[in-house]
Amino acid sequence: MLGENSPIFFTMNQNIEVSIADILARLESKMDKLDGKIDNLSNEFNQVKVDVAKVDEKITGIDKRLSNLEFIARTVGGGIIIALLLALTRFLFPSVTL
């Protein structure tokens, strides 16, 4: 009769335990590799966030400089238009004094 104490049953249990131990060891090694990959991705993501913040800061600086240049261009453009209008007025009406 086969019972729990028989050699066949004990050998089957041993083989199953060894197989489960091997499977667990492989699963743990795969999980360790996945953890490493996740850590690497997390570090790369953090680096990308830092790079985006730097680019955003540079864009803000460029926007401020561009706003200043637009103001200067409008002022100079307005001055040139006024000067041209005055010159045209002087040319068309030389006897009028301003």
Image (cartoon, rainbow, N blue to C red):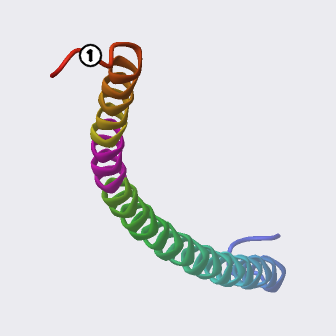
| Quarter holding residue 95 | top left
Say which of 86 and 7 sits in front: 86
Query: Left or right: 70 with respect to 27?
Result: left
User: In the rendered image of this protein, does residue 77 appear above or below residue 6?
Assistant: above
The quarter of the rendered structure image containing the C terminus is: top left
User: In the rendered image of this protein, does residue 89 appear above or below residue 65?
Assistant: above
Query: Left or right: 40 with respect to 91?
Result: right
Q: Is residue 73 magenta?
A: yes
Assign the magenta stretch its main secondary structure: helix
User: In the rendered image of this protein, does residue 84 appear above or below residue 92?
Assistant: below
Q: Residue at x 68, y 77 (%)?
A: 30
Residue identifier under label 1: 95
Say few, some or many: other residues with alpha carbon within 10 Å of mark 1 (under 14 / 14 to 19 / 20 or more).
few
x and y, in percent, of residue 71 in the image:
28, 41
Say which of 20 and 38 sits in front: 38
Q: Is residue 84 magenta?
A: no
What segment is highlighted magenta in the picture? 63-74
| Quarter holding residue 11 | bottom right
Q: Residue at x 64, y 81 (%)?
A: 33
x and y, in percent, of residue 91 in the image:
40, 22
The quarter of the rendered structure image containing the N terminus is: bottom right
| Element type at mark 1 | loop
